Amino acid sequence: MANDDKKNIYMRLIRYSYPYKGLIAVSMIASLGVAGTDAATAYLVKPFVDKMLIEGNLALAKLVPFLIVLLAAVKGFSRYLQEYHIRCAGQASLQDIRNEVFRHSVQLSMRFYSNNSAGRLMSRILNDINVLQAAVSDVIVSLVREVITIVFLTGYAFYTDWKLALMAFVAIPAASWPAAAIGQKIKKFSRRGQGAMAEVTSVLEQCISGIKVIKAFAAEEREEKRFVDQNEGFYRLMKKTFRYSAATAPVMEIMTSFGVAFVLWYGLGRVAAEELTKGELFSVLAAILLMYSPLKRLTKANNRIQKALGAAERVFEVLDTPVEIQDRDDALPLPKSEGRVSFKNVTFQYEKTPVLIDFSLEVTPGEVVAFVGPSGAGKSTVISLLNRFYDPQEGQILIDGVDIREVTSKSLHDSLSLVDQDTFLFNDTIANNIRYGHENASIEDVRAAAQKACADEFIQQLSEGYETVIGDRGVRLSGGQKQRICIARAILKDAPILLLDEATSALDTESEALVQQALVNLMENRTTFVIAHRLSTIKYADRILVLEKGEVVEMGAHQQLLDNDGLYKRLYDAQFQE
Ligand SMILES: Nc1ncnc2c1ncn2[C@@H]1O[C@H](COP(=O)(O)OP(=O)(O)O)[C@@H](O)[C@H]1O
Ligand SMILES: [Mg+2]
């Protein structure tokens, strides 16, 4: 990372603390208390040595116990104030970062999600922010306090005897040189370690979501090996980090001992030459020794900061991923749609190969259009484009004559109701899953929708009916039951354009027939795009489009297409051979 980038990352991180200036100010003031007591301690060494030890002034000595308690009390109270306020400020800033990463992630396009594994994203959001968290709680707490303490002690040492202090400040900082070099190494390996951790998480996530396949193929051992290997890679990187971080303190200590020995030797010479009292010498030495632990903490802090910068860089990478699809500044809400849809010469590709080529289609309000074709033909892509999950490279998609890129995403999706194979349900009650996006819907509306989707019956049989919690933390449902809940959700939404992509694929023939009837009712007075692998279910469509390799090869009503004796006929015959 170039120095400029590093500075930018610092500045960006610091910007998150702006809203908590008040807390930080209190903490800084309290730091003065901590630093002041340390400087006072060094200062008191001088009269202690000169007046009490050498002159034997016992009256003064009686004050010492009292002073010890007083200094400890002032220091303790200041530390408490300092630490409490800075921790709160750090935590609050971190919470803002976490929220921002989440907010931004949700905005990112479908393309981003199909290119990034869930595990890697979660690792980035959780692990990297945890590294920042560790840095915030350890580093920020001590950073300002230690720096102020060092400044005070340095000031005091120079004030007492600038020659001796100068000597100390030439000799001792030599210690920070190797430490800084070590910090660089630590940063490098820790960044790679974080990357390796993301891989480990990714393997883990894949295994957990694909556990059924793994078991069915008895691939446990293979997966275990993959995981163990990834984990081993992570360990090797961490070992390198440890090698350097473990060396930091000893190297510092050894270097410092040289410095201190040298200063002591020089100081004793000056006392012998009577340029300095013994009290002054010990007082300056006390100041230097008191600097040792803040300095040590600062180098530790430096290592942590290097780690945190690595993590911050990765977090900012997510934040800086441009949101490919977003509302224009002048986006208007789409008026209550009639359901006229047109695709005008749309050409689209996910990556290199075109998936839709010069695709045009005019759909009148209320029309039911079915899409048929081999898998990979581009049927689902048509629906994704209408949802604006992606923008086409060429051409236009219009609803009621308005380009969907000109309207707000909210109003666009209010006009569309999508049911596909992906029957995702939230960890929530059945009722809340059905009213998702329409939180105000009454339980009667929810039930009516479920009835139309042929879901009411099985829901009633569950122990807590509509209030049954489903998903990870609740009752397990069959694929067909989940699909019916998704259909109920779409029915409740009551949007003018209905998009059904294999919406009944998880149902058995019997319930499909029932749900099919519900869907036919739902299609009434609604523009509908329907994709179904069972051709029997799309016979009644007003129009059938046969897609092959991204192009419309046939179009017409069921009978017409059969008479055509083309791809549709072949697909149809193949399905009804038995
Ligand atoms: N997210 C994606 N990224 C890259 N390619 C994709 C993505 N989704 C689909 N494709 C490709 O686009 C083509 C059309 O896919 P799709 O519209 O899902 O087909 P269908 O629904 O007709 O089976 C396929 O070749 C598929 O591999
Ligand atoms: Mg599909």
Image (cartoon, helix red, strand yellow):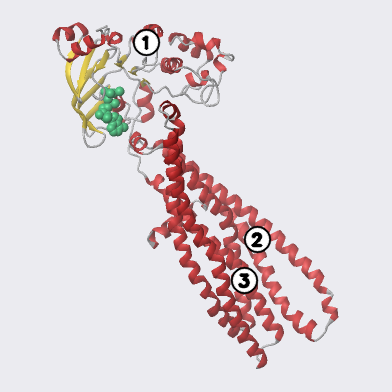
Say left or right for 30 vs 344: right
- The image position of residue 380, as x and y in percent, is 29, 24
Q: Which amino acid does label 2 sit on?
A: Ala
Of pointers 2 and 1, the one earlier in the residue sequence: 2
Give amino acid for label 3.
Answer: Met
Nearest to the observer: residue 278 or residue 409: 278
**Quadrant where the C terminus is found in the figure:** top left
Q: Which mark is residue 519?
A: 1
Q: Do the residues labelled 1 and 3 touch (CB within 8 Å)?
A: no
The image shows residue 443, relative to residue 302, as above or below, that is above
Q: Which of marks 2 and 3 is in front?
A: 3
Quarter of the image where ligand 2 sits: top left
Are discs 2 and 1 less than 8 Å apart at CB?
A: no
CA–CA distance in space, label 2 to label 3: 18 Å
Q: Position of residue 296 (x, y in %)?
A: 58, 66
Which residue is labeled 2 in the image? 30
Which of these two is toward me, 260 or 233? Answer: 233
Q: Which mark is residue 291?
A: 3
**Element type at marker 3?**
helix
Residue 166, image quadrant: bottom right
Q: Which of 235 and 382 is in front in this view?
A: 235
Residue 558's quadrant in the figure?
A: top left
Q: Position of residue 448 (x, y in %)?
A: 48, 10
- Residue ID at (63%, 83%): 264
Q: Is residue 576 visible?
A: yes
Q: Is residue 531 placed above or below 24 in the rendered structure?
A: above
What whole-number distance in Å separates the C-alpha atoms at marks 1 and 3? 77 Å
Quarter of the N terminus within the rendering: bottom left
Residue in view at x 36 percent, y 44 percent: 321
